[in-house]
Amino acid sequence: MYSSASTAFSFHVTATDSAARTGEITTAHGVVHTPAFMPVGTQASIKGVHHDDVRASGAEIILGNTYHLMLRPGAERIAALGGLHAFMRWPYPILTDSGGFQVMSLAALRKVSEQGVTFRSHLDGAMVELTPERAIEVQILLGSDIAMQLDECVRLPAERSEIERAMHLSLRWAERCKRAFEQAAPGRALFGIVQGGDNRNLRAQSARTLADIGFPGYAIGGLAVGETQQVMLDVVADTAAALPADRPRYLMGVGTPADLLHAVARGVDMFDCVLPTRNGRHGLAFTRFGPINIKNAHHANDPRPLDPQSKCPAARDFSRAYLHHLFRAGEALGGTLLSIVNLHYYQELMAGARAAIAGGRFADYLDATVQQWAAKSDRREEID
């Protein structure tokens, strides 16, 4: 178990089943049971979904974005209003990413140097500097329970020289972030981020160096950015095994339900991804039958719910015909309901994984879940 007398943050593993494991992360705002999926609240909001519905889905922790919140409404403003928990009225754990992903996704608007990243704001074109120290300052102002170091993520495929350069830069930034984070209030934790692209040797080097620097938790970043699923899972397996066993492991920005379960099998404890809400807004529901595109015409006369056995009211109580109608009519409620369906499914998937690991039957749970997806996906009425 990692803990510190000066903070309320701790983590301990409660059960293992091969590489898969369950655990508890204790923060000043509550306990997170792992494996855990974090809904993404980029701008202090899970897009299109009320906080109560997010919590009702089973979510114990959410993610906020440093880059977007520092631009609007501003970290200093949020701090003056009581911090991010009070500002958005979410009294449970919050993790904030550092803005490092925007180093990649806003490539046309930024310049990277040893000092940090200079962005041209996508809102008004103003120049904004994000250094490791500023990334930490912003996250301290936001008051998140778990902060992330600033890193540079490289889109794949890329040349080894470019991957190696970004990895070493991220390690130097990790040291600066740790020094800057020493002023954070008790009860908060800073995670280091392993980089190295799809090169397993570079990943191992990054993991070893970060472990030597020492963090309460570690993230695996820079994946699901162009590589195949098998490459991603191979990198995840190697990297998770190289990280300290007594610290939480967080796979950033991943992914599909299959990605999550296969990564849990390789020792990952935490996930975040926009897929549940983004796909929900576009008419795709994740269910135990596999994905269902509710906008397809054959749902127009279908009185069945998405899943009559689901604990989610949106999946259990509304007909497919009604959900189809909402999307055809352009009603925002359609995207909200499917987002709720998807958030519930992701949380149910993680709860099932936790129970299976605790019972020593995770491999069976994974196989049965994947087989059910495959069996249903062959049926036109469920998937097309």
Image (cartoon, rainbow, N blue to C red):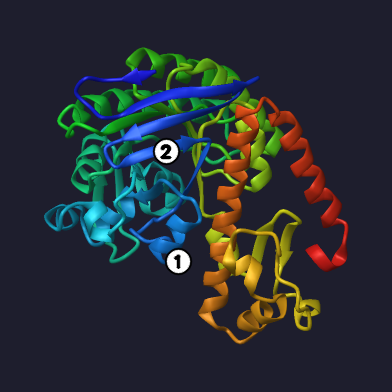
| Residue at 78% in and 80% down | 297
Which sits in the foreground, 238 or 344?
Answer: 344
Q: Which residue is label 1 attached to? A: 49
The amino acid marked with disc number 2 is Val
Question: Up-down: is 167 above or below 293?
Answer: above
Pair 2/1: label in front: 2
Q: Dot 1 surroundings within 10 Å: few (below 14), some, or many (20 or more)?
A: some
Q: Dot 2 surroundings within 10 Å: few (below 14), some, or many (20 or more)?
A: many
Q: If the image is split into quadrants, where does the C terminus sit?
A: bottom right
* Residue 108 in the image, given as x and y percentages of width and height: 43, 53
| Residue at 40% in and 46% down | 61
* Residue 85 in the image, given as x and y percentages of width and height: 26, 52
| Residue at 33% in and 48% down | 92
Q: Which residue is label 2 attached to? A: 32
Q: Earlier in the sequence, mark 2 or mark 1?
A: 2
Alpha carbons under labels 2 and 1: distance apart: 21 Å
Give the SS element for disc 2.
Answer: strand
Question: Up-down: is 159 above or below 342?
Answer: above
> Residue placed farthest to the left in the image?
80
Q: Is residue 264 visible?
A: yes
| Residue at 67% in and 25% down | 360
Give the SS element for disc 1.
Answer: loop
